[in-house]
Amino acid sequence: MGTVPIYLVLAPWRHLGALGFALFWMLAASGIYLYIRFDTSIAGAYDSIGALEWWFGGVLRSLHRYAADAFVVVLALHILRELAAGRFRGFRAFTWISGVPLVWLLYASGIVGYWLVWDARAQFSAQATAEWMLAAGIGAEPMARNFLGGESITDRLFSLFVFLHIGLPLALLAGMWVHVQRLGRPATVAPRALAFGLLGMLLALALLHPVASGARWDPAAVPQGLQMDWFLLFVHPLMYATSPALLWWAVGGVTLALAALPYLAARPRAPVAQVDPANCNGCGRCVADCPYEAVTLVGKRALVVEARCAACGICAGACPSATPFRSVAELASGIDLPDLTVHALRERMQQALPADEVVFRCEHARGSGGIALRCLAMLPPSFVEYALRNGARRVKAIGCREGECAWRTGLELSAERFAGAREPHLRPTVTYARHGDAYEFALR
């Protein structure tokens, strides 16, 4: 059997969402230690941060900072990748829209975290945020005056910063959980080698270029010569280079554009899967295999949730009644696609037989020709054996590139079925070899 190249298994672009979760847990673990050592008062905050700049505490503080920056980079790449792949329309709209607030929760968490350092950079960020909020009439006037140096800041206000820096990441985690709820078998855990490699890179950066505080917060002075974190704090220079009102328009416009994108760029949807009660025995295989949790069991029958259905056909490939060996004129499956039925697939296969080679091809795969499938996992393994026993010398099944499955789990499900690890499985009388995104089958 062919093996998948390790560089594809560990390719970072395949695991951007999972890397986001990994970075969140790095931030949480390092943040807990930093909070234990942190003095949550106006008088002691700056000195307690300074005391952390010795070996272990300093490394963790630097790791915490660089992990936050990496989180921003991973989030941006994740958005761009999903946008380029068109994964925001139709049944993916909920997942896309639920991710929009996560962008601002991440930025808000990072910006408030800078305030806790209580140095000149924190002063600049807090003052810029207060000016931005006041421009929109948001926030209490006394609090804004505190930020802007008109009055002394109290421990009570500083406690609010601490509360926000804990509460906002918790809201971010809750939002990340909602974000993956309509994904079956969500990939929230990165490969161990990739996760530890990322951690090692961040630790090396923390050791080679440790983070240090600036001058102490001084309400009577204007911060000068600041070293900016352009990943998280770029909005402040942008506001001063333009205006608070323009920044509000920009943030609001980007948010509305991202949220409206699934509807502005909508395309006609393929007909969703349909259940045939006469052929559905309630086995639940379609429920287990659906990548988007669009199929549920009600009593002893499957039910398709139309808003979630991707019309990928994976459920049809999982149905035990979708076997071409059934001696019926009209092959009816318990669950099927109305525009690309298993009966139509059987007819096309029978028309191609006998042949030296029968090719089944995912419509998103490279190349052309063969019997088109919506997804490789739409192919019941019994079709392979049927073709081999009815005049095909060999059968080839071609899917998407490894890690680029158009329907998330199609390649994985097909691999498990062909290996006999998942129902419906390929019988032991059929051998196969895998070469990247293609399988070749023959009778023993």
Image (cartoon, grey):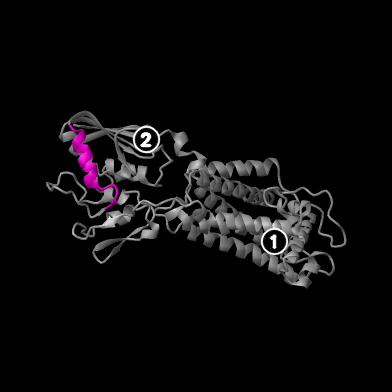
Q: Amino acid at mark 1?
A: Phe
Q: Which residue is mark 1?
A: 38
Overall secondary structure of the magenta section: helix
**Residue 200 quadrant:** top right
Q: CA distance from mark 1 to mark 2?
A: 52 Å
Q: Which of the image's four quarters has the C terminus?
A: top left
**Image: magenta residue range:** 336-353
Q: Residue at x 83, y 54 (%)?
A: 223
* Lateral position of residue 12 relative to residue 415, left or right: right
Q: Which of the image's four quarters has the N terminus?
A: top left
Total numbered circles: 2
Q: Which residue is mark 2?
A: 437
Question: Which residue is more in the foreground, 391 or 75?
Answer: 391
Give the image location of residue 375, x and y in percent.
34, 44
Give the image location of residue 192, x and y in percent.
48, 44
Instruction: Answer whether residue 329 is magenta in the image.
Output: no
